[in-house]
Structure formats: C-alpha cells, structure tokens
Image (spheres, grey):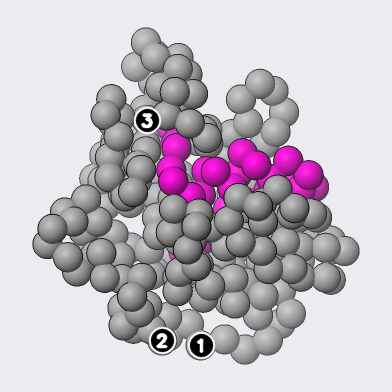
Amino acid sequence: MKITKLDFVEGAKSARGITVIIDVFRAFTTACYAFEGGAEKIIPAGSLESALGYQPDNPEVLRVGERHGQKLPGFDFGNSPTEIVAADVRGKTLVQTTHSGTQGMVNAKDADEILTGALVNAKATADYIRRCQPAEVSLVRMGWTATTRTGEDDLCAEYLEALLLDKPFDTDSLRDTLYNDPCADRFKDPEQPWSPMADFELCCQADQFDFALRLNRNGAFPYLEKIPTL
C-alpha cells in the first residue's frame, strides 16, 4: 500500500486512490457527531451560496458552516460538535460548508473514493481502508483555513498511517499533546467563544465511533454516508 501525505486544496486536487480528507478541528468531527445523533446524510458544499441554495424552504434541511471558525449568517449551526450534540438532528439532511474540510471534499475529483478524517473515527476509517486493500492511499491534511499546517491534522495523519501499516501509536497522549500545541489556543481564548473548550474535548475523543464516513458521489449532490465497521 502506497501512502502519500498531502496538504490543502492543492493536495486534494492531486490525491489519488482512496483519499482521506482530514479536518479534526472541526468539520469531520462535527460530521461524526451529527451521524451519531441520527442525521440522515450530510452534503458537503464548497461555497456559502451553494449551501444556502440547497432546498432553502425544506424544514428537514439544516445548514452547518463557518469561515475563520465563526458561524455563517443564515445557518442553523456553526461548525461545532458541541452545538450538534445539543441539537435534534434525527432524520435531517445537513448541508455543511467550512473553510477547510469541505473544500478538500469538493476538490478531490480524481480520488477513487473519498473518506473523512478525524480522530473520533480514525480506527474505523483505517479498518475500512484495509478491507478495501487499495494500492494507493492519500492522506490530505487540510489545516487552518486550508493554508496552514496544524498539529491536530498532522497527528491524525500520523495515526491513520500507523493504523494502516499496523504500527504502534500512543493514543493515550493525544489529548494532552494537542492541548499543549498552538492548534488548541483558540479553544482557550475567551475572545473566541465560537470555539469552546467543549469542542476541543469532543474532537480529541479518539476512536469514539465505529463507522467511517464516505462521500457518495452518485447523483447531483454528493453526500456523506456511514460505513459501519464489520
């Protein structure tokens, strides 16, 4: 299995094989908690306009989104797992647009398959990839605003690689490592209430969920779907 680590939108564009778009803080952690809460599907959107334009009058559609970490006007939720955990999303379709994660999703056009990457379902994601036995895997670290490498996405890529190669990895120290990394600063900043410490804690719950999230690209509006662990 050839494993390639890539970064940002350009990395997503060049990704091949089974591709994991990594966004730990917070897009694909939020997506996992939404599915755990009963969401039917999640539609990743690249732009604010496309997110708002999808079935705007349908009460079963909820919008999740941020730019620079902050909730977008006209959206039901920011990109916050804490908000999603507290909400009733059972049976709902979520449309999600973020500064990093969903940009990778919509640009990985040459990938054979596209999966989300987060610590909360890393093992399930790696298990799914290993079942597929691909020749090539691309791990795309989206970072902060898809322009700057971040500790959490780097660490998630390292963990996924270790799982895929059946190498040991210390998950017990993940939370403390990230807490002491600059990537956690925004969660400690009282001037950034849109990034609560509760989000940080939810994002650091390694292997909380036993499902991978795969982008179903059939139809006009590709959507994320759960792939349970066998």
Of the residues shown, which amino acid type is indicated by label 2?
Answer: Ser
Of the residues shown, which amino acid type is indicated by label 3?
Answer: Arg
> Which image quadrant for residue 136?
bottom right
Of the residues shown, which amino acid type is indicated by label 1?
Answer: Asp
Give the residue number, with chain letter if any, for mark 1.
Answer: 170
Q: Which residue does the image show at 69% across and 23% down from the upper left?
A: 219
Secondary structure of residue under mark 1: loop
Secondary structure of residue under mark 3: strand
Residue 37 shows up from this direction: no
Q: Is 81 displayed left or right of 120 in the figure?
A: left
Q: Which residues are magenta?
A: 93-121
Is 17 or 72 nearer to us in this picture?
A: 72
CA–CA distance between discs 1 and 3? 36 Å
CA–CA distance between discs 2 and 3? 34 Å
Q: Which residue does the image show at 76% across and 48% down from the upper left?
A: 111
Secondary structure of residue under mark 2: loop
CA–CA distance between discs 1 and 2? 6 Å
Tag 1 and tag 2, C-beta contact below 8 Å: yes
Give the residue number, with chain letter if any, for mark 3.
Answer: 63
* Badge 3 density bin: few <14, some 14–19, many ≥20, Cα 10 Å: many
The answer to whether residue 102 is above or below residue 136 is above
In percent of width and height, residue 73 lies at: 26, 29
* Badge 1 density bin: few <14, some 14–19, many ≥20, Cα 10 Å: few
Q: Which residue does the image show at 27% across and 45% down from the upper left?
A: 70
In percent of width and height, residue 171 lies at: 48, 82
Q: Which mark, by number, is residue 173?
A: 2
Q: Which residue does the image show at 65% across and 52% down from the upper left?
A: 10
Residue at the left extreme, as displayed: 190
Q: Quadrant of the N terminus?
A: bottom right
Residue at the top extreme, as displayed: 57
